[in-house]
Amino acid sequence: MSALADFKEGIIHASIEIDAPPEAVWDALTEPAQLASWWGSDDTYRTMNWQVDLRPGGKWSGDSARVDGSQQGNVHGEYLEVEKPRLLVYTWKASWDDFSETLIRMELTPTAKGTHVKVRHSGFGQRTASGAGHAEGWKRVLGWLAEHPALR
């Protein structure tokens, strides 16, 4: 797994190899019940209340809460491209980032072992602290995804 922030371009590049077929990874990334079950951990935060209208122009959202109750958040956006099970492009507006709009492009490619997940998160501009924070976040998120019981 890797996640690197290109501060000059305001882009995060992240990727991971997951031992599951693209269809299963796609479902984990797009089904509300699955998102809530794997996105987060018992020592950081949990996500809940996922809403997904999986089509170009469809809206999505999710809530989060730190496990110690100290902070709650919301993230939402719009799907721009939906090509099951290989491409998902959507906007990302997070409460902890003043709802600044960024763009996430996820490519799922079948491999001999399962699926290569490639993430390109762009639109950070000169907001290097936000980019650095999101790069660290992608490392955690992709790790949680790879450990999702439905993918093992």
Image (tube, rainbow, N blue to C red):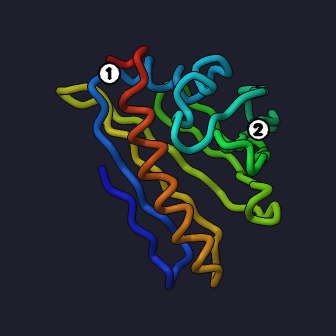
- Given the current orientation, which residue lies at the most extreme left position? 112
Name the element at disc 2: strand
Q: Position of residue 71 (x, y in %)?
A: 75, 50
Residue in the image at 32% along x and 38% along y = 116
Task: Place residue 121 in its image quadrant.
Answer: bottom right
| Labels 2 and 1: the sequence-earlier one | 1
Residue 91: % across, % down = 71, 51
Against 111, residue 66 (above or below) is: below
The answer to which of 67 and 134 lies nearer the viewer is: 67
Q: Position of residue 107 (x, y in %)?
A: 45, 42
- The image quarter containing residue 69 is top right
Q: Quadrant of residue 94?
A: bottom right
- Residue type beneath disc 1: Ala
Q: 114 or 94: nearer the eye?
A: 94
| Residue 3 rendering spot, x and y as whole percentages | 39, 59
Location of the C terminus (image quadrant) = top left
Label drawn at residue 20: 1
Q: Which residue is mark 2?
A: 63
Relative to 66, 24 lies left or right: left
The residue lying at 42 percent from left, 14 percent from top is 150
| Vertical placement of residue 4 versus 107, above or below | below
- Amino acid type of the residue that numbered disc 2 sits on in the rendered structure: Asp
